[in-house]
Image: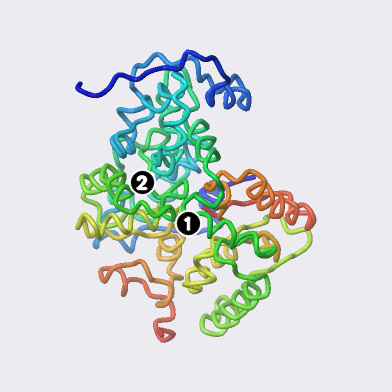
Amino acid sequence: MAEQPIKLGAERKTTFLEKVKELLPEGGNLNLCLTCGACSSGCPATGLENMDPRKFLRMAALGMDEEIRKSEWVWMCSMCQRCIYVCPMQINIPQLVYNARALWPREERPKGILGSCDMALRNDSCSAMGTSPEDFEFVVQDVLDEYREAQPEFADMEAPIDKQGAEFFLNQNSREPVTEPDEMVPLWKILHLAGADWTYGSKGWGGENYCMFLADDDAWKHLTTTTVKQADDLGCPIYLNTE
Amino acid sequence: MKNIYEYYAKWIREGKLKVNSDWNKDLKVKFTVQDPCQIVRKSYGDPIAEDLRYVVKAVVGEENFIDMTPNRSNNFCCGGGGGFLQSGYKEQRLEYGRLKDEQIQVTGADYCIAGCHNCHAQIHELSEHYGGGYGVVHLWTLICLSLGILGPNEREYLHDDLKEVNVFHPESAM
């Protein structure tokens, strides 16, 4: 290797790795790496930006905080946790990545993720597409009416919003109501035939949470709290994720 | 907090959803399934992956299901998660997904079932980018197809081979 050797600073200061360790149960096992490379060998992000999970962890362990801070690879790791699954020491590299994302000034984080998070913060829907509760209610009712008429076997089918005391509180990915509303119907039919007592919420119906991907803790907590509170306020015992 | 795969399986076992795979007996359309990281590895583990397979096999026929390798909790992420789809790093995202595309193509399946929207969008793009040509479908589409209640306008993600199969109220086509 003709590259310059890495020089470690002689001055001892609190590193990024140490800060992340304090946040995680068992410190995320971040000091337990055996350098075996099982994480990297099975990671689809290995090689992107000349980075891989083991290398990222080693850099953090060596206190290379500036390099960590600058690495765009943190946006290419999907935090899928396969590295934890195969790791003999269960090291939480995805949390290291998540917290490295949070080192970026908010406005410098990827525009698409930032935009989707900000959309979700616009109103109570918490939809990454910014759809209002009123628009959601309109689309659901419109599609429901259409199908009740066109398919009389489903004339009694329901798609309730804010039904008090329903057994299941369902969330809904924004893609269907906004861009392909007919695709909502198969799920409604299944619920209808199964006799499920379910409801959407006018608040917090959006099933996606881009603020979490943005590593904006306050924002993702707001979205999650809004939807869970709506389920609680309606008295729904089961929050049912539809994906 | 529950996931709907568990309930699909429960409702089929209880006889509330009377699915069957007769529609695919002669067609023999082949399916594989993507285990969404968020639902399987990160939340409910292998038991929900088993529920997912139980549902898939019940609706497409056991002989028409081909698993990817590796699978379940050990499955590879497709590259659609973690905000990757919106991050702007398209070239890297497609390179990330190369492994997933190879996994799917090796199964020889006509369709990959993706019960997660991020997976759905990413795998759809992988099929086009790498030329695999396999379709990507939501699980609810196939459940309704097997129940004989899938209308003509609910087939956005079915290819021509399944556009005309078991159509519910064909007269309502738009």
State which quarter of the image contains the N terminus of chain B: top right
Foreground residue among A233 and A126: A126
Residue type at mark 2 is Cys
- Image colouring: rainbow
Category of crowding for the residue at label 2, using alpha-carbon neighbours closer than 10 angstroms: few (below 14), some (14–19), many (at least 20) = many
Residue type at mark 1 is Lys
Residue B101 circle label: none
Q: Is residue A121 left or right of residue A28?
A: right
Foreground residue among B91 and A180: B91
Instruction: Tell me the quarter of the picture where residue B170 sits.
Output: bottom left
Q: Is residue A65 above or below residue B156?
A: above
> What is the CA distance from the residue labelled 2 to the residue labelled 1?
22 Å
State which quarter of the image contains the C terminus of chain B: bottom left
Q: Chain of mark 2?
A: B
Q: Is residue A45 left or right of residue A174?
A: left
In percent of width and height, residue A44 lies at 32, 38
For label 1, the residue is A111
Dot 2: element: loop
Q: Is residue A4 left or right of residue B152?
A: left
For label 2, the residue is B78
Residue at mark 2 shares a chain with residue at mark 1 = no
In percent of width and height, residue A228 lies at 71, 51
Q: Is residue A10 left or right of residue A158?
A: left
